[in-house]
Image (cartoon, rainbow, N blue to C red):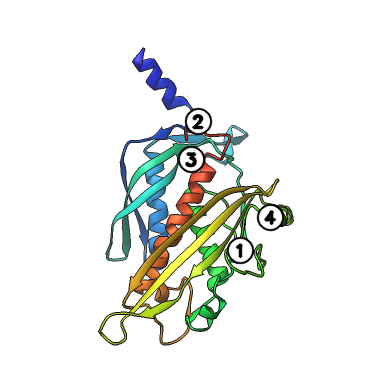
Amino acid sequence: MKVLLLLALLCLPGAVLADVIFAEGVASSAGRSITEARRDALEDALWNASAQLGITVRGRSQVGEAAVIQDDTRLDTAARISRYDIVGEWQEGDIYHVRIRVDAAQALCGDPDARMGAVHFPLLQPHQQLTSSLNGIEPGVPNEILHRLSIRTGTPPRRAEHRRLLEPLNGLPNPHAPEIRERARRLAREMEVNYLLAGVIIDIGYENVGLIRNTYLRRSEVEIYVFAGDTGELLLQRRAAREAKGDVLYPTPVAFGSRRFYESRYGEAFDWVLDRLSQEISGLLACPPGDRAFD
């Protein structure tokens, strides 16, 4: 009886797979930046981790004159990764390696045709933009989240629309407000997506700390909102923040998301924030409300 019950639970869509999984991904760094190679290696590691939980073969072949003339075979993994940690990364020659540990994965139970759109994230304290030396942060934050999300969930990669859901800002918004819900629904319809990502960049400021001159502390803090495209209902509200100390200022303007940005201590902190938020969204898409077998 226990064996039958276990098999039934494993077959339920949305059941959480609790076994810890380790997986490694690789990518070529020849003629490319380390950031690009790292992203591809991470994508490879996530796919390999999902593949350990099973692979579904989908395909269609066309035969003409006793010969296969078209083969559209495709391999799909049987799970989506909602929580993972990078436990190691290194480079050997022109090959970049990333090793991850997966503590939570979910069987596919969400919408396989999920389309996530995004709008620019305004800065809660606009004066910080004038002193940050970071270019493109307002469109850069949602684009980076969308990129990480497309890697984890297999959703089509998109770019954030040059529009805002929240403007003008006078303190933190109320994402439950009827006017925000209606605007989210309208934007999702215009963008032809079934989920809309919006948010606020709360803090990118810095302060001088310690007794040593030119020692700075800088905080990266972002809050996100995910809305259902058909109703404008708020499905997810999360905030992530991390502090960095040391290499947090830039002598010349630096593009947000560039190699120079991610090589700094502040870029590393922001990378963690963006990863954390994209993990929260991937967990939502894996099993949206109403589709979850277990909460």
In the shown orientation, is residue 229 left or right of residue 55? Answer: right
In the displayed structure, 124 sits above or below 80; it is: below
Q: Looking at numbered disc 2 in the image, what kind of residue is underneath it? A: Ala
Alpha carbon of mark 1 to alpha carbon of mark 4: how far? 14 Å
Residue 160, numbered circle: 1
Q: Quadrant of the N terminus?
A: top left
* Labels 1 and 4 touching (C-beta < 8 A): no
Nearer the observer, disc 2 or disc 1?
2
Picture coordinates of residue 243 (x, y %)? 36, 68
Nearer the observer, disc 1 or disc 4?
4
Pick whichever of labels 2 and 3 is earlier in the sequence: 3
Secondary-structure class at tag 1: loop
Alpha carbon of mark 2 to alpha carbon of mark 4: how far? 28 Å
Q: Looking at numbered disc 4 in the image, what kind of residue is underneath it? A: Ala
Q: Quickly name the residue at label 4.
A: 184
Q: Looking at numbered disc 1 in the image, what kind of residue is underneath it? A: Ala
Alpha carbon of mark 4 to alpha carbon of mark 3: how far? 35 Å
Secondary-structure class at tag 4: helix
Pick whichever of labels 1 and 4 is earlier in the sequence: 1
Secondary-structure class at tag 2: loop
Q: Quickly name the residue at label 2.
A: 293
